[in-house]
Image: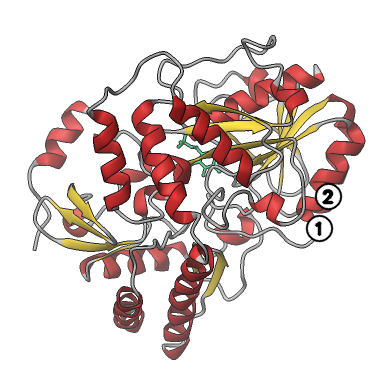
Amino acid sequence: MTENSGWWARAQEVLPGGVNSPVRSFRGVGGEPFFVDKGEGAYLVSDQGKRYCDYVMGYGPLILGHAHPQVVEAVRAQALLGLSYGTPTHREVLMGERIRSAIASMELVRLVNSGTEATMSALRVARGVTGRRLVVKFTGSYHGHHDSLIIKAGSGAATLGVPDSAGVPEEIAQLTMTVPYNDIDALREVFREHGRNIAAVIAEPVAGNMGTVPPVPGFLETIRELTQEYGALWVSDEVMTGFRVTYGSVAESRGLEPDLITLAKVIGAGMPVGAYGGKRQYMELVAPLGAVYQAGTFSGNAVAMAAGLAQLSVVGEPHFYETLTQRTTRLAEGLKERARRHGIEVSVNQAGAMMTLFFNGQSPTNFDEVAASDHERYRRFFHGMLERGIFFPPSGYETCFPSWAHTDADIDMTVQAADAVFRQL
Ligand SMILES: *Cc1c(COP(=O)(O)O)cnc(C)c1O
């Protein structure tokens, strides 16, 4: 079946590249992305009526799958009462309380509209608190598209930031320093040289935007130790990992206490939401209490809060994360085993319900190792799976998100399809 419906040509006439976010412009069956009419549980249905078992899941938010009845009902009920008010509502308070009860170090929480806004605002707080200019991020980590963080690294030791995007002034890029993920020595080196000027280290506690790359032992602990020693803030960017890997924060689940934490994705259940928060002494700097300005017409939006609260109440049930992690492991093990049967070298990185299949005999621990995987082979794998009605992320630098809606049967069907695709790779 071809997926050509004429909409892709129309899309390209009116939207840059036909899309509203670059990752969506992949070549699907027939060389075009498919358009979605609806989502049902673990499946997407295209405008051509083709069903895809979906492991992209909106890039992370849809941990319960598409159109979960409790989430849909909460949205419907709220919509009848109005969409947005510009005044305080109970649900914003309930969301703040729910987040704080799951993540103790988020003593004060500010709700925003996206992960990008959350990290942008958290950095502003860190700079406001410390009166310093520099921030440190890790190569291959994505924290949103704002000027300070859309910076790529050179390889090896820390390099001064080079913007990853035109339109970012060099003066701003130079305030961001990049270090390879999991490189404890390089991080120490940066602190030895610049420590007293560093406002914040921002890190994903499990990297998810270069494929899934878990932290090596001691990596997060070193971030904590160095930021404390030099008076910088540790911003744990849990936009992807928060309420995805475990109920709450990955950093806290490892017994660590970040200064600021950012959330989005799962806490919005598919509605546009973000949040940042941390110790009271830092968050008291945020307007209207303090001098760090940050605001938003839709922040804490009523419909988004309704959706997010409904989702968080389901994932808060006992054994939710154990079960979802087991299903993800079933997929990871199945893929590995079938690849080996066909003599194909792969590794799978997994953290809870995040996983990536790398065509690489070694599990990558940083961006360069991810880049050294066979991405051409991944591309062929992606297309083979898509033809068989399974939607994996279009790039080998993305994470797969199994959801609560994926049954063991869905996963076994996926592994069967992968077997057939591996045979042709
Ligand atoms: C997705 C993501 C962001 C950006 O969130 P948006 O809602 O897309 O702006 C930031 N940080 C991490 C770790 C992410 O995964």
Residue nearer the viewer, 14 or 90: 90
Residue nearer the viewer, 24 or 71: 71
Q: Is residue 181 visible to us here?
A: no
Residue drawn at (62%, 43%) of the image: 101
**Residue 401, horizontal then vertical, whole percent:** 43, 59
Instruction: Kindly tell me whether mark 1's CB lies below 8 Å from ligand 1.
Output: no
Q: CA distance from mark 1 to mark 2?
A: 6 Å
The answer to whether 209 appears left or right of 5 in the picture is right
Q: Write down the quadrant of residue 284 in the picture.
A: top right
**Does residue 141 lie above or below 182 as drawn?**
above
Q: Is residue 104 visible to us here?
A: yes
Q: Secondary structure at mark 1?
A: loop
The residue furthest front is: 90
Residue drawn at (61%, 70%) of the image: 363
Q: Which residue is mark 1?
A: 218
Q: Amino acid at mark 2?
A: Thr
Label 2 crowd (10 A; few <14 / some 14-19 / many >=20): some
Residue drawn at (69%, 11%) of the image: 290
Q: Amino acid at mark 1?
A: Gly
**Residue 78, horizontal then vertical, whole percent:** 29, 31
Image quadrant containing the C terminus:
bottom left
**Residue 153, horizontal then vertical, whole percent:** 65, 41
**Residue 255, horizontal then vertical, whole percent:** 77, 54
Q: Secondary structure at mark 2?
A: helix
Residue drawn at (37%, 44%) of the image: 23
The answer to whether 212 appears left or right of 20 in the picture is right
The answer to whether the residues at label 1 and label 2 have Cβ atoms under 8 Å apart is yes
**Does residue 187 lie above or below 398 as drawn?**
above
Image quadrant containing the N terminus:
bottom left
Q: Which residue is mark 2?
A: 222
Residue nearer the viewer, 361 or 198: 198
